[in-house]
Image: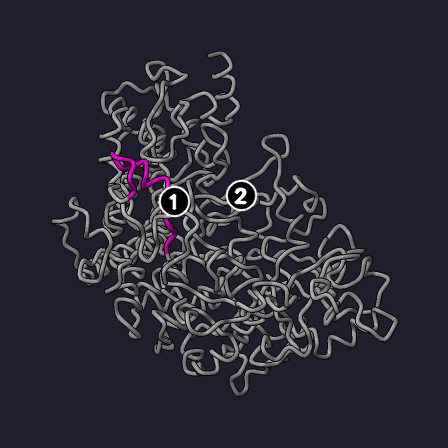
Amino acid sequence: MKTIYSKLACGLSAAAFALAFGSCDDYLDITPPSQVSPETYFMTAEELGAYTINYYKGSDVDGSRGANLFPHHGIGGSSYTTFLDGDKGTDNEDGTDNRFFDGASYYTVGNEGGAWSFNTINDINYFLETVVPRYKAGQISGAEEMIKHYIGEAHMLRAVEYFGKLRALGDFPIVKNTQTLDKEELIKASGRQPRNMVARFILEDLDDAIELLSDGSLTGGRNRITKDVARLFKARVALYEATFEKYFAATPFVPDKAAGWPGAKMDYNKDFVYDNEAEVKFFLDEALKESKLVADAHPTLANNTKQMIGTSATTFPKNPYYDMFTTQDPSNIDEALMYRSYLLDIGGGHCMNQYIKGGRGYTQEFANTFLMDNGLPIYAPGSNYAGDDFVTDTKTGRDWRWRLFMKAPNEYVYADNSDMRIGCGKKNKLDAEFKAPAVVSGGVDFTTSTGYQKGKGWSTISDYSRGGHDLSAAIIFRAAEAYLIYMEACWEKKGDQLDADAWKYWSALRTRAGLPADANITINATDMDLEEQYTHDFGLYSGGSRITSKVLYNIRRERRCEFIGEGMRWDDLIRWRALDQLKTKRYFKHGAKIFGPMLEWFTQLGNTGKPRYLKYDQADPTDNNVSSPGDTEGGFNGDPKYFSLLRVSSASDWYRSGFSWRMAHYLSPIAEDHFVQTSTSGDPATSIIYQNPYWGTTHSTPAEQ
């Protein structure tokens, strides 16, 4: 017990000394004996806070799960990946995801594990069922505001965990209490509830959180959950579910018995009635209500001073918009609703800046999405687009989100080290002006897999690029999301006739990005056919058909550009049902135009008449490191000058497949062993749970469609 309280005092993992839960993930996890008697713990506000803070972190009770509930630099959480890799595999960035593979072996039903687990849910349920009665009975000492706040945190934490289950699996058991040791009762409690009811349960938890939470002044400020964070998260969940149910209406993915919903075959769902239109309206109304409360409470976004970072060795001005993602202390930035701070002597730093300098890059298609600063798309007459012959040119006169958060060749990166510049040189100060990006690794300091270097969160402090020394705070929730949620929810409810608040929020975002405040300038200049040609934006589609509203598309564009590098793209593509079109039309994504005029720079670097660093058309295709300049099949609209990211080696499965899609992949499959464990006879066919649409229950089998 002395060790226990020592750890409490240091604010370290409460789970190491609280309850030791078993690792049974097959059906509802039970609560084995506690290492700390509940009669002597959970008796003070400080003990409550020490327990709930554990579920912010990257380890939990048995030290093996690893994923905390909130994503941050270096680790993901609640089925999110890290900020560095958050958009990996989408149309925003390089990388692949097995869900896109056009084959039978890459994404299959698992044997065990997966998203079907109850560990964290059970931990938090135990906390709530122990603490709430004690609070009501006046048995917990400490400031009442703090006690209520930490109970509110637990409700939010459970909601976050459930949202991860909703996004991965859809229907899921709603479990509010820890369970008994009786297996039959555990199996009974494992019955899946319809996804709309799961989403409603999440909102109910968040209502409890909002009622109990404070502004954080007594409980750690915005390093912890606050009332506004819970409101914003509620708006996020509500918009997600509203749009998912709208765009998946009349499919088995929503609990519509007439559409083949697999839950309909279960006796426990026999009386369930579903009204798609009513559910969509309910969730949209909730999204509008909560997002407006947050947006109006935070009317001032971090200011963009329109100062570029690193245009010369001495040009590192303060730009609050850029600095929001690099500062060690965002406490004075009202937009930053929740963040994670780091201290070397307490928990250490992270590795974001170590990896960002030699990692993934943005796609050409994403680059083409950003508007010009006159509000026009790059293809529009009078846009003054400088072209993409050189990476640096793509920044000229562009949306400031592209200027600030994409690092181009010849830019200095560290205010305390003038030797270092982006480009193909090892020590760029000794070289001529570079226009060629380091698209492959080897002999250079900064590389990008596409030519368009990721730059959001890139600190100007060189020491932060050392592993474990990066102290830049991770922004977890920010008020700009509330603006975007309101805009989109308003369109989904009212169509092109947005209300005054939606236009106001949109104007604020555009103004900060250096665009004209009036979004109609962009809307009127938008050509959906040309957007398809230039951006190949997955968000142009819902349900396999191209959307027709230019207003909606530009709201989706705004969201895509505002969240550059923040890992929000996957959720958007899933809830918009924006991938059906890939079932019949394979897609190759691209990097910069390395075989255009930039090729001359690569050739000059080689001093041999051949491009340095670039290897293509090798006798052994596995020796290639870029695509072929003659590959029209994989070219960008047939133009092979652009780096075709999936076409480097003809020996790769992705070379032939490109990006494809199967309907089942909108949800994850439940692993085979869970069907065995939730059957009284051990026969998966008699399990109380059912598989997601178009998946079987035998491990290693691919989606049926």
Residue 636, position as x, y percentages in the image: 58, 77
Which residue sits at x=33%, y=55%? Answer: 291
Most foreground residue, 609 or 146: 609
Residue 669, magenta (yes or no): yes
Category of crowding for the residue at label 2, using alpha-carbon neighbours closer than 10 angstroms: few (below 14), some (14–19), many (at least 20)? many
Q: Secondary structure at mark 1?
A: loop
Q: Residue at x 33, y 65 (%)?
A: 501
Mark number displayed over residue 671: 1
In the image, residue 610 above or below residue 205: below
Between the C-alphas of marks 1 and 2, the distance is 24 Å
**Where in the figure is residue 176, as x and y percent of width and height?**
26, 34
Of tags 1 and 2, the one toward the viewer is 1
Q: Give whichever of discs 1 and 2 has the lower sequence position.
A: 2
| Magenta-drawn stretch contains 491 | no
Q: What residue did someone put label 2 on? A: 75
| Residue type beneath disc 1 | Ala
Residue 499 in sight:
yes
Residue range of the region highlighted in magenta in the rendering: 667-684
